[in-house]
Image: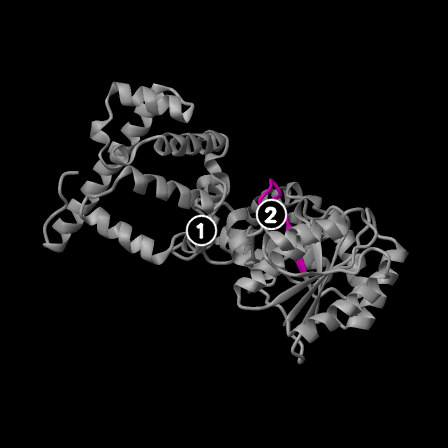
Amino acid sequence: MRRLRGRGKLTEADVNAALREVRMALLEADVSLPVVKEFTNRVKERAVGIEVLKSLSPAQHVIKMVKEELINMLGGEPAHLQRGGGDTSVLLIVGLQGSGKTTSAAKLALHLRKKGQTPLLVACDTRRPAAIKQLQVLGKSINIPVFTQGDRPSPVDVAQAGVGHARHQGQDTVIIDTAGRLQIDDDLMQELEEMKSMVKPDEILLVADAMTGQEAVNIAGEFHRRLGISGVILTKLDSDARGGAALSVRSATGAPVKFAGVGEKMDAFEIFHPDRLVSRILGMGDVLTLIEKAEQSFAEEEAKDLERRLRKQEFTLDDFLSQMKQIRKMGPLENLMGMLPGMDRMKGQVDLSQSEDEMKRAEAIINSMTVVERRQPVVIDASRKRRIARGSGTRVQDVNRLLKSFEQMRHMLKNVGKLERELKRGGRFPQL
């Protein structure tokens, strides 16, 4: 976009030069060629001849249009699950084997339970070895019931029985985990078509692997042609995949991406926000998702208590440990850093795996301290450091490094309090 600096009006040559780079970026992100052509043509139509606003540079104008068109291509607003008129909503989960279908079914059940619903998982994958057992293990781990009749009845009969069981038990949502294949075949589609006809699902959700890129178009297109999918769950969006599958699937089927799998843990599952993904693709970060993760991880009462302690300058190593645990609950550091604007430029320059190791080491060191040592680190002398290092499986140098980091943080927090008090008095910024 540097080439567009200083332009007062965007010419066709300017826009073509910029869109050539955008086209290459999209193709590298594994977006299908027809989708790329359609997208760049729409941006070009909007951009050519436009007068550049004084508040924006020409480059910013093009980026603004690229962002808006990407968001439109992904559906604009987050798409929500549809519910039928009955008391029990039926969700049919389909997809190829290996796409994360069974895990996604369990993650969706946990997500809906957090929203106050009472889901039932139904195990209809009677072909893949251990598929039923996998769903049972996942269901037990999140305390959600799983309905199964073993691998002998037909999947269609199991699905019907599962829906009947949920209605009898008063459960409001049925999530049916269906069989998959390594590739699409007619037997699979006939089975799913029959199941659709018998249980009449409110939603048919296709689980697609974000790593499949352009191949996602063919997979989604065939499932949509035979079943009429109503939405997509995109897995592995925390991987190196850059969103190409999301763009391709939406364009090929018109069905919105409704949920995204963003990690291996059962709670690493979120509503898909087109604008947030686009911001991450363009390196603008995703601060809203970061805030939501923080709100889920940090209890309000704990935060208020910590604020009170900070104001009184009572920050201890116990508080330090608690904050590290809360941060780790939010997910891998690499994912969190990716949500901050501009941090994509830092990739490769910061070893985040090393930072994760440092946090684990710090936890071990603090856990090896006595109550007095955590509350009054000043008592930690050389002999205590040696004992703490032995107890935590670390070196004395690691203990020293942690204590130094803690003191630096205490000093910083103390100065923040000083700044706040000075500003409340209407004074000038103190020397920090």
Give me the C-alpha separation between circle 1 and circle 2: 15 Å
Q: Is residue 299 above or below residue 79?
A: above
Q: Which of 2 and 360 is in front in this view?
A: 360
**Which numbered tag is attached to residue 290?**
1
In the image, taking residue 49 as reference, residue 180 lies left or right, namely right
- Which of the 4 quarters of the picture holds residue 144? bottom right
Horizontal and vertical percent position of residue 344: 49, 39
Q: What residue type is labelled 1?
A: Leu
Residue at the spot 59% in from the left edge and 57% down from the top edge: 143
Q: Is residue 9 magenta?
A: no
Q: Which of 331 and 169 is in front in this view?
A: 169
Tell whether label 2 touches label 1 (CB within 8 Å): no
Residue at the spot 20% in from the left edge and 29% down from the top edge: 378
Residue that lies at the very extreme toward the right in this rendered image: 187
Asked if residue 48 shows in the view, the reply is no
In the image, taking residue 77 as reference, residue 341 lies left or right, namely left
**Magenta: main secondary structure:** loop
Q: What residue type is labelled 2?
A: Leu
Q: Is residue 98 above or below residue 228?
A: above
**Which numbered tag is attached to residue 237?**
2
Residue at the spot 19% in from the left edge and 41% down from the top edge: 414
In the image, taking residue 125 as reference, residue 296 lies left or right, namely left
Q: Residues within 10 Å of mark 1 (few under 14, many from 20)?
A: some
Residue at the spot 26% in from the left edge and 32% down from the top edge: 373
Q: Sequence-wise, which precedes: disc 1 or disc 2?
A: 2
Which element is circle 1 on?
A: helix
The residue segment tinted magenta is: 232-242
Horizontal and vertical percent position of residue 422: 12, 49
